[in-house]
Amino acid sequence: MKTTSTSTPLLKNKHAVIFGAGGAIGQAMAKEFAVQGATVFLSGRTLGAVSEVAADIHQDGGIAYAAQVDALDEQAVNAYLDRVVQEAGSIDILLNMMGPQAKDYGNSTSTMELPLGQFLLPFSTLVPSQFITARAAARHMVQQQGGVILFVTAIPGRGFANAAAIGSAFGAIESLLRCLATDLGRAGVRVVGIRAGAMVETRTIQQSVENAVQRLGVSKEQVVSMFEQRTLLGRLPTVADTARLAAYLASDGARTITGAIVNASSGSVID
């Protein structure tokens, strides 16, 4: 006997806010969350890219709104999230994907040669931005007695050659995650992280590949193959892989997970 299989979207009736939604990972997250039933509120420092993402989601039958918000501007972030709550009634998921480019914080530069300014850059941009947006969302989530704050870091947070700046910043963000989970758990707010591997669709990894091509004198394909061989699974994660995992972690199916960082690096690092 044939039966019709139906499944409820993971994030049905959820309201998700994504800062930095114009980048490769932010776009993938926004589209996956929308596919899974969430209404998504997308923002970036410029409106163009996030408007395109919102238009794509609308075209596919989802609900998305785009706004221009600087995730380092505390007052602007607070005002934006206040508006979201006024319009939607709640903030159920918060994700911040903003960040400087790999070339800006000195990836591939030896720690012995890394200028102090480059080392400090992610601590003056990436880390405070994550704090600003997470705290602003947490204030609303505590009042509504529920919500999920998601962080995405990467393998340099576990130690990686010639990546002292971003590696140290990711370590700080992962510590912030644990502190927030401790502070917010009794209010029903979960704080969860993903430690991602090298996703070749992202600007950061594309820059890293280009640096390796110039340094080693090999092709892009050879560099990507080298990255793959460094993983236990022999393959790299994609932005779609990471987005699907994020949707699950933000869903009620992961209701017992908080204060944890999921290693989604294909085995690039081992916890």
Image (cartoon, helix red, strand yellow):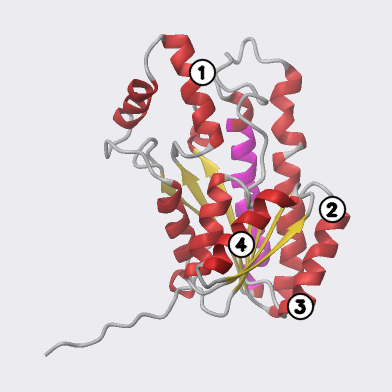
Q: Which residue is mark 4?
A: 55
Tell me which numbered mark, 2 or 4, is placed earlier along the sequence: 4
Q: Nearer the viewer, mark 1 or mark 4?
A: 4
* Residue at the extreme bottom of the image, as rendered: 1
- Residue 10's disc is none
Callout 3: SS? helix
Q: Which residue is mark 3?
A: 87
Tell me which numbered mark, 1 or 2, is placed earlier along the sequence: 2
Q: Residues within 10 Å of mark 4 (few under 14, many from 20)?
A: some
* Residue at the extreme right of the image, as rendered: 75
Query: From the image, which quarter does the N terminus lie in?
Result: bottom left
Q: CA distance from mark 3 to mark 1?
A: 45 Å
Where, by quadrant of the figure, is residue 266 drawn? top left
Q: Is residue 121 left or right of residue 265?
A: right
Specify the amino acid type for callout 3.
Glu
Specify the amino acid type for callout 2.
Glu
Q: CA distance from mark 2 to mark 4?
A: 27 Å
The answer to whether 36 is drawn above or below residue 150 in the figure is below
Q: Which residue is mark 1?
A: 211
Residue 264 percent coordinates (x, y)? 41, 47
Q: CA distance from mark 3 to mark 2?
A: 20 Å
Residue 178 within the segment the image draws in magenta: yes
Magenta stretch: give its range. Answer: 167-186
Specify the amino acid type for callout 1.
Asn
Q: Residues within 10 Å of mark 3 (few under 14, many from 20)?
A: few
Tell me which numbered mark, 3 or 2, is placed earlier along the sequence: 2
At a point 71% along the width and 15% down the height, the residue shown is 115
At a point 74% along the width and 47% down the height, the residue shown is 129
Callout 4: SS? helix
At a point 74% along the width and 52% down the height, the residue shown is 47
Residues under numbered marks 3 and 1 in contact, where contact means CB atoms less than 8 Å apart:
no
Q: Residues within 10 Å of mark 2 (few under 14, many from 20)?
A: some
